Image: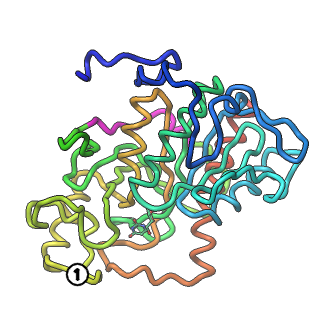
Amino acid sequence: MDDEKKAHSELGLPNPYLNSLDGDFLYHLGYSSLEARNGFTKDGVSHSFQDVKFVVMGGSSGRMRSFAEVIAREINHPVQTAEQLDIHRTDRYAFYKIGPVLSVSHGMGVPSITILLHEITKLLSYAGAKDAVLIRIGTSGGIGVPPGTVVITDKTFNGFLKEEHELVVLGERKVRPAVIDQELARAIQSSQSDARFQTVLGGTMCTDDFFEGQPLNLTPIDCNISQGRVDGAVCEHSDEQKMDFLRRAHSCGVVNIEMECTAMSSLCRLTGYKCAAVCVALLDRLKGDQVKIQEEEYKSFGMRPQSLVASFIKSRLSS
Ligand code: R2B
Ligand code: URA
């Protein structure tokens, strides 16, 4: 189907085939379109997705369990324990509902977050929660920023340093714009209440691999060095090439590297949801590749995006 002629479904999502589905089962979440529309029951209590205003996503299930409790405290939710807030139906993604906030894990990398984004945006649309915002809280490798800095993404780049997301559909390469909401990024930065850490607005590069590069039929020298690590099980580029690439990325405005942001920004642009990425830098990649961080520091760094996003949600809910 031609991009320009693409019809929207009655839901407002850019897929006309959704109109003819006789019920839609969101297989990886374990909820149906009927439950998204009408609500569901847990422990004898009725819940609805219609009131969802924020979907906070992060790679690990533990982080999203922690965030469920953090946000419950911040917004004085009547239920405060993760066990009671837990609404997961499958083992694929951790899933908590804290009033108007969903706390969901997305796993590692573009394929994993993409599946979640398709299902969660359908869930929100079936429920009529069309103005919900999606925020990824995560970890990343910094470029030219000290470890512990929280980066709020204002541009999302792929491994070619383009503000695009590439995918292969029906045997052909498809390129979609990967742009992110500036106003939301600035609003998150200005809601910081804990002054014990630095935040920066900056570019985030999304890669399909933590170590070498993306699994495309290109040599790394074609500039697609991606995270460019030289400490993977395989490495076919030199440390000098890595440093050249990281410096080039930095000169394009990239201040951190992670593995999901272009998929999120491009899919959210198409589905009409605003999104943001708030990731702490665990290391400065200009100084090395190994993530050698003490457990206590890792935990405290990991809490920073949670604290910032909790302040943002609290301020939005009280305004
Ligand atoms: C950041 O950290 C993970 C890899 O360690 C990945 O999910 C990401 O984006
Ligand atoms: N996550 C990444 O994707 N890269 C890093 O260097 C650290 C965390």
- The kind of residue tagged 1 is Val
Q: Is residue 185 visible?
A: no
Is 190 or 40 nearer to us in this picture?
40
- From the viewer's perspective, tell me whether residue 52 is left or right of residue 16: right
Q: Using the rendered view, name the quadrant where residue 258 is placed.
A: bottom left
Magenta stretch holds residue 178: yes
Question: Which of the pair 121/197 is nearer the observer?
Answer: 121
Going 23% across and 40% down the picture, which residue do you hit?
170
Q: In screen coordinates, is 165 left or right of 139?
A: left
In the rendered image, the vertical position of residue 5 relative to residue 178, given as above or below? above
Q: Pick the quarter of the image with the C terminus.
A: top right
Quarter of image, ligand 1:
bottom left
Q: Residue at x 77, y 36 (%)?
A: 40
Residue that mark 1 sits on: 234
Q: Which residues are magenta?
A: 176-188
Q: Quadrant of the N terminus?
A: top left
Q: Is residue 38 magenta-colored?
A: no
* Residue drawn at (51%, 52%) of the image: 278
Q: Percent x, y for residue 215?
A: 22, 62
Query: Picture coordinates of residue 76 (x, y %)?
Result: 85, 46
Q: Quadrant of residue 188?
A: top right
Q: Is residue 241 visible to us here? A: yes
